[in-house]
């Protein structure tokens, strides 16, 4: 097999190329850095993102802080105080329109305070402050009318205490109550600020409470004296002793400045004394009825309803009136009627007795006269007979 001539030719060409290439390359120089290897080209890093500046936040949209909550609590407390003071002087009665406006503002403020942002809470505080001023204004406008009526009430309570005998029982306690009236007048005449008006009202109320307690206590003591005078304690001794204890407790409370307890204790004493006196009246009237009935029966036995019709009729009317009063538990009226009927029944049977005695005497005299007449007749007859003989 014949070999191809092309491999030899190709080999020669390749060798020639290598020689030429080597001969054209400059010789390496000393200390020359080695050639760098080609690096793969990298892409540039992305530019950093610049954060956007946020828009400033409205502080009114923030939740309320502690300072705002404290201001709210202060405003609410002031409103509650002003509202109660206006109520104490009866502003809804004297100034109904102003009171209604303040009440509507109060409701609006409470609704506003339910929201949660600082701005809404600040609005609620502002509204509460306006409401407090509205209540104070309403109270100031009501004061002249309130003091006018309160003065009348105080004077009436004082008069009742005096009528109950407090001047005789305890003039010093009455004088102490009068001092609160003087203090109220002094504070009222000073005028603004509003605290003076409210302090004047408190003094006036204190005087009123004291007068009422004194009036109640004086009434209880007067009833106690009536029970003792009529001897009614024996009919309900338990309640009488409990009433005494309540009255002593009321006096101690009054002197200690607790007018509410003093008045309540005096009222308790008065209630128990009333029970004693009612029981006493029932017992006493029952005894009076027995007495009246005994004299009535004696009058009937003496035929007074016939022999002394006028006296017996008057007594019988009183007796029937007493029975009717007893059925109605009007013991005082029954007592009076029974008491008045007894002497009339006595008078009626005595009149009847006197008439009976007179009648019996007349009968005896008549019988005697008849007897004498008969004896005289007999003597005359004897005389006549003797003459005839």
Image: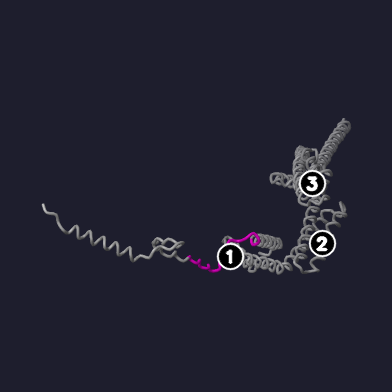
Q: Earlier in the sequence, mark 3 or mark 1?
A: 1
What's the residue at 43%, 65% (across, down)? Answer: 44
Q: Residues within 10 Å of mark 2 (few under 14, many from 20)?
A: many
Q: Along the horizontal axis of the image, is 276 left or right of 20?
A: right
Helix, strand or loop for disc 1? helix
Q: Earlier in the sequence, mark 1 or mark 2?
A: 1
Q: Is residue 353 magenta?
A: no
Q: Is residue 62 magenta?
A: yes
Whether the residues at callouts 2 and 3 have beta carbons within 8 Å, the answer is: no
Q: Residues within 10 Å of mark 3 (few under 14, many from 20)?
A: some
Label 1, on which residue?
120
Q: Tell me the quarter of the picture where residue 102 sits.
A: bottom right
Q: Earlier in the sequence, mark 2 or mark 3?
A: 2
Q: Furthest residue to the left?
A: 1
Q: Quadrant of the C terminus?
A: top right
Magenta span main SS:
loop
Whether the residues at callouts 1 and 2 have beta carbons within 8 Å, the answer is: no
Regarding residue 309, the answer to whether it shows in the image is: no
Q: Nearer the viewer, residue 145 or 13?
A: 13
- Residue span colored magenta: 48-68
Q: Nearer the viewer, residue 286 or 173?
A: 173
Residue 309 location (% of width, % of height): 76, 46
CA gap between label 1 and label 2 equals 46 Å
What's the residue at 82%, 45% (across, down)? Answer: 248
Label 2, on which residue?
181
Helix, strand or loop for disc 2? helix
Of circles 2 and 3, the one toward us is 2
Residue 236 location (% of width, % of height): 77, 39
CA gap between label 2 and label 3 equals 48 Å
């Amino acid at each position: 097999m014949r070999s191809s001539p092309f491999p030899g030719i190709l080999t020669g060409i390749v060798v020639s190329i290598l020689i030429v290439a080597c001969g054209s390359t400059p010789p390496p120089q000393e200390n020359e850095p080695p050639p760098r290897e080609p690096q793969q080209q990298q892409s540039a890093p992305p530019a950093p993102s610049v954060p956007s500046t946020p828009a400033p936040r409205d502080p009114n949209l923030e939740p309320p802080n502690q300072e705002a909550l404290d201001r709210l609590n202060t405003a609410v407390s002031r409103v509650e105080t002003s509202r109660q003071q206006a109520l104490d002087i009866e502003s809804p009665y004297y100034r109904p329109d102003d009171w209604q406006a303040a009440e509507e503002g109060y409701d609006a403020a409470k609704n506003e305070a339910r929201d949660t942002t600082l701005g809404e809470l600040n609005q609620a505080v502002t509204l509460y402050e306006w409401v407090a001023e509205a209540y104070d204004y309403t109270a100031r406008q009501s004061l002249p009318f309130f003091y006018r009526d309160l003065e009348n009430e105080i004077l009436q309570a004082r008069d009742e205490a005096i009528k109950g005998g407090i001047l005789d029982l305890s003039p010093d306690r009455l004088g102490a109550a009068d001092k609160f009236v003087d203090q109220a007048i002094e504070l009222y005449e000073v005028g603004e600020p509003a605290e003076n008006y409210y302090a004047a009202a408190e003094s006036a109320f204190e005087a009123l409470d004291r007068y009422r307690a004194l009036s109640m206590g004086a009434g209880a003591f007067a009833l106690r004296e009536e029970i003792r005078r009529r001897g009614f304690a024996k009919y309900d001794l338990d309640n009488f002793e409990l009433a005494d204890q309540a009255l002593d407790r009321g006096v101690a409370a009054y002197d200690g400045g607790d007018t509410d307890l003093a008045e309540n204790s005096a009222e308790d004493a008065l209630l128990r004394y009333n029970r004693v006196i009612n029981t006493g009246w029932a017992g006493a009237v029952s005894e009076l009825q027995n007495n009246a009935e005994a004299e009535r029966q004696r009058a009937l036995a003496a035929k007074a309803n016939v022999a002394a019709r006028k006296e017996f009729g008057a007594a019988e009317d009183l007796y029937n009136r007493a029975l009717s009063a007893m059925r109605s538990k009007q013991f005082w009226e029954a007592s009076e009627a029974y008491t008045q009927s007894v002497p009339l029944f006595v008078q009626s049977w005595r009149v009847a007795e006197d008439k009976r005695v007179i009648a019996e005497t007349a009968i005896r005299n008549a019988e005697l006269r008849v007897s004498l007449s008969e004896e005289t007749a007999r003597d005359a007859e004897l005389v006549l007979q003797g003459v005839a003989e």
